[in-house]
Amino acid sequence: MKKVFLFSLIAALCIFAFNYQSPEPAVINNIAVQFVTTNNYGNNLYVDNFSIGNQYTNDVTVTSVNIPKDTNYSFAGTATFKVAPTATVMNVGSTTASGFNVVMTAGAYTSTKSVSSVASGTGINVVFDSLTITPNTPLNMKIYSTWASDMNKANDTLTQYTYYLPGVRRNVLIEAYTQWNCGPCAANTPYLDAFQSAHWDSLCIIRYHAWWPGSNNDPMYLYNTVQCSNRIRYYGVNGVPDGDMDGTYLHIFPYSPPDVQFGVPFYTRLNKGTPIGIHVTDSRIAGDSIKSDITINIVSPLVAGNYKLRVNAVERIRSYSGGSNGETSFKDIFRRMYPDTNGFAIPTTVGTYNYTYKYKRETEWIDSLVYTVAYVQNDVNKEVMNCDKGRRWALDAGNRGITPDVAGLKAMHRPEGDFYNNKMFFNTPQTDNIDAGFNFEVFESSFPPSGWSISNPDAGVTWSQFTGANGPLFPGSKCVTLPFYSYSGSGQNDYLNTRVYNNLDLTDSIRFNYAYAVYTGYADRLQVQLSTNGGSTYPYTIFDKSGSSLATAPATTSNFVPASASEWGRFSVALGTILAVTRTGTEVPTHFALMQNYPNPFNPVTNIVYMLPKSSQVSLKVYDVKGQLIETLFEGRQNQGIYITQFEGAKYASGMYFYKLDAGDYKEVKKMVLIK
């Protein structure tokens, strides 16, 4: 029996070696990848810079343009307006790219700009000549590079369809969450105050007080516990300080640096027109009441949704003492929402609609410091369409009086011009439909990317785009996150699925950056799975880590955001190490074993066989003589059986190497020699 088993094993090795020498590598199609998270209410996970394929020596790509795709809204009704188109060009090759042009066309419009050089792994913004946009007129744009040395032409061109409808400028709403016993709140609030002071002309802020941390004795929460709680739960806020911008950018923390944490999404929102205009005027009546006149102007039909007008009484500034974090001055305090936190339903057809709401100034409030903030929100996706406030000035930090000092006033002023060209943060996805030899997604554009999808079974917290952190593999300012810190539904799975990739081979690799910090006592999990049938099933697990094994940064009880490249991890695995691990025969071995590689010595390919008597979590890795990991041949779960794979040594120097098998409790290391 032993002789029969040995003969079948040698025969399998011979067949495998023969097949490997085939001069034409097999084309692999229908590859898809799935990121699966399991929540344990720990700390935030970030993923960035997913790629599949092999990096070219010379490869530049046009990744984005600051004009959003598909349907958008202008800033001035049906009037034409001008934009300075700005495209991002990225060098994803391994050497510096130099001496090429980038061209943009849109109908009769053409603009050509030269690029002197772009270092490997970096990007530049190319600003084209001014483009006139006419609402109600389709715009087909094409932006492409002309670098003759580019080895991957498939990703040189960005094509995009854009259509502007009449719209108006927007203001931006920040809803912030705080508490007077919260130490981090005291540390972060000054950054929000400074940002508000610098952007008073187009920014509304409402600050809700929570019932935690510490004693539930915050007077600003206790004044209106029901409505404060309703609004905090509306966004699923589970920690303070926290901030939401326009219901689109959620859970902004920390607040520093404010130009990044608030500035990036703020200017992104300002550069998006809206179909809804809103104007609020406050006046005092009958001595102790406030009349708020609200005009809503819908200039284009609204898409399907559940649109609500929400009217809020806000107190600009008050002094309180008694909290444990040292704060005594509080701004933009939420007092009451009328008639309740559900708000008013509004029409969706084009027209001008006037609303008047009168509310009594309550005894607790200082009359001259109370004002109205009104906004329209779509409850389907929580997006705030526009907002305005009844107060046209901001008090200086040192002015606490009921009657403002004229020297302490800052007049309300809307900026002139069209786009905020010095603060461009728009990115839009590349729409080429050619499968390139090097496919990548840097998550700088709309989310989920074209062809990708999200599955959120519990309809709770799930994968979202994050601004203010970027993995080190490619440049940018965005990534994707699963905010476990705010995800209280332990045990829930969320799924992020890539598009389907074709024209790959076994030498192509899957790579991505990830970042995670443990919240002590809680262990979240990330699995990455591979499909070879276009996403119907995912039989290969190529990454599976949780808790401390997933961590790339020190443990913390704060809301983790990676602050530097050192707090990111990098994962890379070749398709060949997954798909070339082949089960041979049907015989079930009686024991674990790692066989000696064949041939040995070898040049440049050798074969490795191992045996599993039962289903196991398997890791097969190769190390150099210094003990440094140089390649992962397989990592994942396999059923019982005999498996065979190969190690390709063409890119390594001659010498001794070690290959190690970990399968359950079984561990074995063997030597092999590469001779060139």
Image (tube, rainbow, N blue to C red):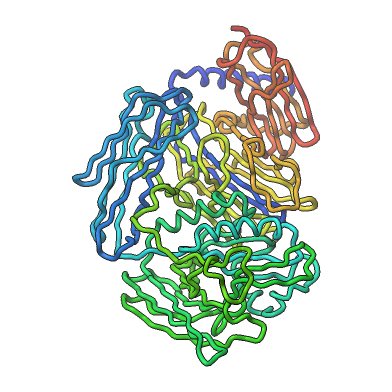
**Which residue is at the front of the view, 535 or 264?**
264
User: Which residue of the protein is positioned furthest toward the bottom in this rendering?
Assistant: 286
Q: Is residue 564 visible?
A: yes
- In the picture, residue 124 is in which quadrant? top left
Task: Name which residue lies at 57% across and 38% down.
Answer: 512
Q: Is residue 450 visible?
A: no
Q: Is residue 632 above or below residue 242?
A: above
Q: Quadrant of the C terminus?
A: top right
Q: Quadrant of the N terminus?
A: top right
All told, the count of numbered labels is 0
Q: Is residue 555 above or below residue 396?
A: above
Task: Name which residue lies at 41% across and 73% down.
Answer: 278
Task: Name which residue lies at 61% across and 35% down.
Answer: 571
Residue 14 on image: x %, y %: 58, 18
Residue 326 on image: x %, y %: 76, 62
Q: Is residue 627 above or below residue 239?
A: above
Residue 110 on image: x %, y %: 23, 40
Q: Tell whether 243 sits left or right of 506.
A: right
User: Which residue of the protein is positioned furthest toward the top in this rendering?
Assistant: 676
**Which residue is at the front of the view, 60 or 460?**
60
- In the picture, residue 287 is in which quadrant? bottom right
Q: Tell whether 444 sits left or right of 397.
A: left
Q: Tell whether 521 sits left or right of 609.
A: right
**Which residue is at the front of the view, 310 or 204?**
204
Residue 67 on image: x %, y %: 36, 50
Task: Name which residue lies at 45% across and 74% down.
Answer: 306
**Which residue is at the front of the view, 16 or 520?**
520
